[in-house]
Amino acid sequence: MRVVGDGLIDRLSRLSRKLLIATARLGVHHPKSVLALTLALTVIAAVYGSRIELSTDLTDLLTEKLPAARRMRSLLDDYGASEPLAIALSGKGSEDVEDRIDLALAIQDRLREHPSIRLVAGLFGEDPWALLEGPQAEALLLYLDPEEIDQLAVQLTPESIDRTVAQNLERLQSPIGPLAARLIAEDPLGIARFAFRHLEALKGRLRLVARDGVLVTEDEQFVITLARVEGSTHDFAFTEELLGEISSMAREELSALDLEGTAGVGLSPLGADNGTIHIGLTGAAAIIVDYRRILAHDIRSISGVAFLAVMALFLLAFRRLLGLLIAGVPLVVGIVWTIGFAAMTIGHLNVFTAGSVAILCGLAIDFTIHLFNRYLEEVHSGKDMIDAFGEAYGETGSGILAAAATTAWAFLAAGLSTFRGLRDLGLLCAAGILLSLAASLLLVPAMAAIAARIRPTRDRPRGLASFGLGPVLTVVVRHPWMVVVAGVVVTLLLAWPALRARLDEDFRRFRPQTAPSIELQTALSARIGTSLQPVLALLPAPDEEMVLERAARVEAAFDPLVHSSDGVLAAVMGPARVVPPPSRQRAALERLASLRADGRLLPAEAERALLEAYRRHGFRIDERAEESARRLRDMLSRSSLLSIEQARYGPLGALIDDLVLWRGESGVEGVVSCYPRPDVGTRELVDGLRAALARSQQPGSLVGGRVLSQEVKPVILRDGARAIVVSAAGVLLILLVAFGRPLLVLLTFLPLVVGVVASVGLLALFRVDFNLVSISMLPLILGIGIDNGIHVVHRFMHHDEEDLVGVFRHTGRGIVMTSLTTMVGFGALVFADYLGLISSGVLALLGVGATLVTAVTLLPALLVLVHVRATRG
């Protein structure tokens, strides 16, 4: 029973048939005119396409509908990147560590003069001596608890001061004298050690030591300097030039210090154990430069592999060298048109759209395969070129239009995503399918006509390779029930693992795994005990005092995650580590005032006692000695709070600027950086931080790539489910329009569903997780996999004189060929350097392969059992 009558749909069908036949005749009769027209359009598209850019912008992964994404974008605006540029000096370990420290300090001096570089004061721990300089020096006792101040007061009597100075003299005269000299000069009474433990809490479980203004791993394999780039790291030309300048500076300083070594992004090109000094660059800026280079290489390599592979398959199947011209020219033209379209509409390619050319190579060649295969069939039956193409376009062309419509619709459905990169992929590939279809319809007859002039002899029957379909179809036709039962059993067996398929939402899968910068970052993470990619807790507050109070409570809530054996953090750094919260400062001031009031802590007496002890034990009373005594008096006399604004003018100012963001009239925002342990999973990390933030009872939000990954999971699942439903609905509607009968729609669609379930089940069995891109492959498999069924059913219903074996002798071999080329196009993604794209290629291979198997087994079995031809009418 037909549900679509002989009305508008039938008239449109007849009109499309006439247009298709007219297109074929135009190409045969006027091949040069067609070529001239397509050449002109191709040149225009190529001009526009040459302007297309490669985007490495992280915002391609974001969606404004998520609060975490908006916070992430704001963070990128404030910082330029969530991770700093790391300059890591490797060498011979302890043997040359002092040389590397001197080299790092020389590079720092050069970087301070660079307008686009700001040195980071201490992401992983600050040199404690910074507390003895600037405003922190006078406020040193405000870092202490009241109990610590009581302990200190006992050590500041004249007798205790004299005893301590005498001990200092003994230490200076001992073998460790040179090492103790600075400590004794700057802090003769050891007051700073009480405050050091508060600042050293920044280190956490990190295997790092602050030495002379640089960071050194505990095994002394790396000396590290950290910096932020003042400018957009996504500006490739700017970032590449900047990294080049830093590398040049490093090489110049190597030469100035008469050291041998190398400099550049990543680990040493000579190998990790070569013994020479290497200044390696990593972090956001270096990764983005690597990212763009690898992205450009991947686009070229996977596109080239896909094109050459489909051409080889075409030659293998058709066994005609001139066939390469007939197939290759329309394919190249369609791709150039698509790139031109992308340049005009999207303007860039990114990691999501990097595989679009390879995908189109595998899909767009299908149109030529079916048209050329049918054309050869008609020629071998005795028709001339005009009639052969007329028959091919009039009949096979209708199936091609339906197949192109389902594929384009599937891409559009996949593009109904909240992620811009996936929307770009959907639009680009949908347009590419339609443009490639137009190129094939125009150029296949024109190229065939030109090929006939090059080689005017009549084509002899060779046809497509059989692919072993004959024996398969014989078994299917003889035992349809066995095939159906086998299909049901396999589907049920694979449905269980399909239901347990997992989604990997980690955005790090879209970073190039073999990039030199990431290899160095991985090496640093192993040595340090954390990555350079923290999760940030943003704490809004109306003023500076409140932001410090909130930060202190949040830092305290996060500390157990550092110190427990099963904790998820390696270190926590926040503003209250650098400037004590006002409540702690007031408690310290009250205890100081109390001790001064009862005479147990007298600032002027302590100053005099220290100077007298210096004289008594033979120390020279110079400006430095008088400064240390005056600093002692000022510490003990302190009666006011240390504000963030005051601390910013000292040596810790740059660090404070990284930890406190001023928001104008809306107040300030504290930044507490949480550095995860290397082996901690995203879910465990984010869940642990959220629970700790909730326990602190402070308003705040977590920001970072791993937080975004966790929050984006439900969005990915929702987008994927919507895309699948929309794709399936569109495919069913197109089938209904194409066939006009619900029974044919059902018979064509059921094998597709079985193939999709099987592919997901196999993916789970192979332990390959879904991700942001691969989950979008499911609606594509629906739109692509249905093409096989469309061509089989279309041929079967229009050739009553052919049995199923005869149908598959012609169409069946064509769908095998087109499936293979599609698998080659998607399969080229496995050569990419991004795990996210690789898993997408694997899923597409499984999906297209599974739907091919069901199209040549389950579908013909159902057609035999249902006797669909007998039910027409």
Image (cartoon, rainbow, N blue to C red):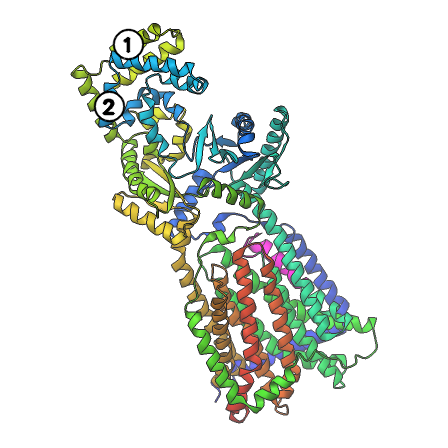
* Residue bearing the label numbered 1: 609
Q: Residue 36: give its label.
A: none
Return the residue nearer the eye: 625 or 117.
625
Above or below 825: residue 861:
below
Q: Residue at x 64, y 30 (%)?
A: 260
Decide: few, some or many residues near mark 2? Use Cα within 10 Å; few <14, some 14-19, many ≥20: few
Secondary structure, mark 2, is: helix
Is any atom of residue 873 visible in this view?
Answer: no
Residue at the (52%, 35%) spot, across then down = 222
571 lies above or below 680? above
Is 696 one of the magenta-colored residues? no
The residue singled out by tag 2 in the image is 151
Q: Position of residue 64 (x, y in %)?
A: 41, 51
Amino acid type, label 1 = Ala
Sequence-first disc among 2 and 1: 2
Q: As displayed, is residue 654 above or below residue 449?
A: above
Secondary structure of residue under mark 1: helix
